[in-house]
């Protein structure tokens, strides 16, 4: 029996978090605080059609750094606002996470046969066309296996869909501002 990557990923993530906490306990407190402050990425949180909040994630929380106008006409003004933040941004070398509002995403749980685990991505693409009003090329999607029930031979898979237009607009705006997008996430 071959397990798919998504079957053991939650266990590996939990083990990694535990091991990281154990190692962090060996680092002096002063160094640990400095590492935590630097670790958080910048988040470009979409707040409307042409507006986003710039947020620094780190130290167990988030700090709102400012608001940016993402309209193409305001690119120079937004670049100036980013330059004014200076050293707060240099730590990340312009790498950001784009956050889409929760209401822009569709989340659903799919019940699939256990046999789908080995081919999860293809099965979800097929089910997407059947169970949602979207075609695969109209959305960005993410799937995550929630649980595997061997007794009923079923999988529970969380599917998250985001329409392409708002994400692509945010990616284009980030590029105009000289920011490199590491990933896209959904709020909440």
Image (cartoon, rainbow, N blue to C red):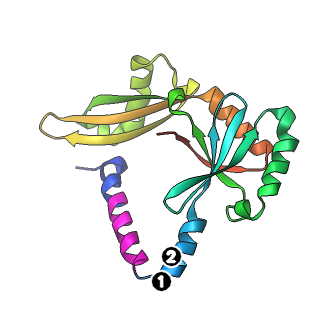
Which mark identifies residue 61? none
Alpha carbons under labels 2 and 1: distance apart: 6 Å
Residue holding disc 2: 32
Q: Please state the horizontal and vertical placement of residue 71, each as a whole percent of the image.
A: 79, 32
Indicate yes or no whether the magenta region holds residue 14. yes
Could you tell me which secondary element the residue under label 2 belongs to? Answer: helix
Residue holding disc 1: 28
2 and 1 marks in contact (CB < 8 Å): yes
Q: Residue furthest left?
A: 151
Q: Please state the horizontal and vertical placement of residue 141, each as a whole percent of the image.
A: 49, 34
Q: Please state the horizontal and vertical placement of residue 156, each as a whole percent of the image.
A: 28, 35
Residue 14's place in the image compared with 111, above or below, is below
Q: Which corner quadrant of the image does residue 138 belong to?
A: top right
Direction from residue 80 to residue 38 in the image, left or right: left
The residue depicted at 64 percent of the width and 29 percent of the height is 166
User: Magenta region: which residues?
Assistant: 13-25
Residue 84's place in the image compared with 145, above or below, is below
Please rate how many residues cluster around mark 1, counting C-alpha atoms within 10 Å: few if below 14, some from 14 to 19, many from 20: few
The residue depicted at 81 percent of the width and 56 percent of the height is 84
Count the marks: how many? 2
Q: Please state the horizontal and vertical placement of residue 153, each as a whole percent of the image.
A: 17, 35
């Amino acid at each position: 029996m071959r397990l798919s990557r998504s079957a053991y990923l939650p266990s590996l993530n939990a083990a990694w978090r535990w091991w990281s906490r154990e190692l962090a306990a060996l680092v002096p407190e002063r160094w640990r605080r400095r590492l935590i402050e630097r670790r958080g990425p910048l988040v470009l949180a979409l707040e409307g059609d042409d507006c986003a909040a710039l947020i620094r994630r780190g130290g167990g929380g988030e700090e709102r750094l400012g608001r940016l106008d993402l309209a193409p006409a305001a690119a120079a003004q937004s670049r100036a606002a980013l330059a004014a933040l200076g050293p707060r941004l240099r730590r990340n070398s312009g790498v950001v996470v784009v956050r889409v509002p929760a209401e822009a995403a569709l989340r659903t749980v799919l019940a699939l046969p256990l046999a789908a685990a080995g081919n999860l991505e293809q099965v979800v693409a097929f089910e997407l066309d059947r169970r949602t009003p979207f075609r695969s090329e109209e959305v960005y999607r993410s799937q995550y296996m929630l649980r595997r029930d061997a007794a009923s031979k079923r999988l529970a898979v969380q599917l998250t869909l985001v329409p392409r237009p708002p994400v692509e607009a945010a990616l284009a705006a980030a590029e105009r501002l000289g920011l490199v997008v590491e990933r896209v996430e959904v709020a909440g």
